[in-house]
Image: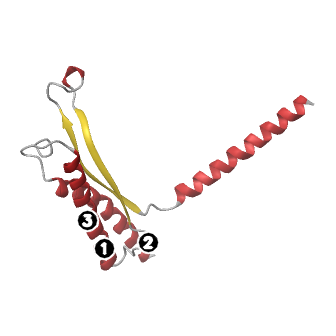
């Protein structure tokens, strides 16, 4: 009888694993509808850095910007996404700046935070807009 219960458990586990695999596959098949806006990582390489002088990440702020409600195949949709990215970059950089001690935020020669955050997210946005254009052309 215990062998029968063991077989039932094995079948149940197999069915559960298959259900999880199907669910994950369906989720992975859905197109992404967001870009990540990341305020540049601030690192510290001074005397209190990690052993052997390795850089230590002090902070990084990320915002997810959704565009699932936009039609990126239109100029208006692409422009709306760009505006959302700019606003998220400003918020992320402000939050990053507020979380760090004075004078640790921007080192000389570093690109401004908002521009760097926007540039990174716009790479993702351009790919999404191109994909939407290709899909609309079909």
Residue 64, image x and y in percent? 36, 58
Q: Secondary structure at mark 3?
A: helix
Q: Nearer the viewer, mark 3 or mark 2?
A: 3
CA distance separating discs 3 and 2: 27 Å
Quadrant of the rendered image containing residue 63: bottom left
> Which residue ends up furthest to the left in the rendered image?
108
Say which element carries label 2: helix
Task: Name, please, the residue furthest toward the right.
Answer: 1
Give the residue number, with chain letter if any, for mark 2.
135
Circle nearer the viewer, 1 or 2: 1
- Which residue in the structure is indicated by mark 1? 80
Residue 33: image tag: none
Q: In which quarter of the view is residue 35 placed?
A: bottom left
Q: CA distance from mark 1 to mark 2?
A: 19 Å
**Residue 119, x across and y down, in percent:** 22, 58
Q: Residue at x 30, y 78 (%)?
A: 75
Q: Secondary structure at mark 1?
A: helix
- Label 3 CA crowd tier, 10 Å (few <14, some 14–19, many 20+): some
Q: Residues within 10 Å of mark 1 (few under 14, many from 20)?
A: some
Residue marked by disc 3: 87
Nearest the viewer among 113 and 70 is 113
Disc nearer the start of the sequence (3/1): 1
Quote the CA–CA distance across marks 3 and 1. Answer: 11 Å
Q: Which residue is at 25% across, 65% downward?
A: 87
């Amino acid at each position: 009888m215990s062998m029968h219960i063991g077989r039932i458990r094995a079948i149940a586990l197999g069915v559960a694993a298959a259900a999880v695999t199907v669910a994950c596959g369906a989720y992975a098949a859905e197109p992404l509808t967001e870009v990540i806006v990341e305020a540049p990582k601030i690192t510290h390489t001074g005397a209190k850095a990690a052993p052997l002088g390795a850089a230590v990440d002090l902070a990084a702020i990320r915002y997810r910007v959704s565009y699932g409600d936009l039609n990126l195949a239109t100029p208006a949709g692409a422009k709306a996404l760009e505006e959302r990215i700019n606003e998220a970059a400003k918020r992320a950089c402000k939050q990053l700046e507020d979380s760090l001690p004075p004078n640790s935020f921007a080192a000389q020669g570093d690109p401004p935070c908002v521009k760097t955050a926007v540039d990174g997210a716009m790479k993702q946005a351009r790919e999404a807009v191109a994909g939407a254009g290709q899909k609309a052309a079909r």
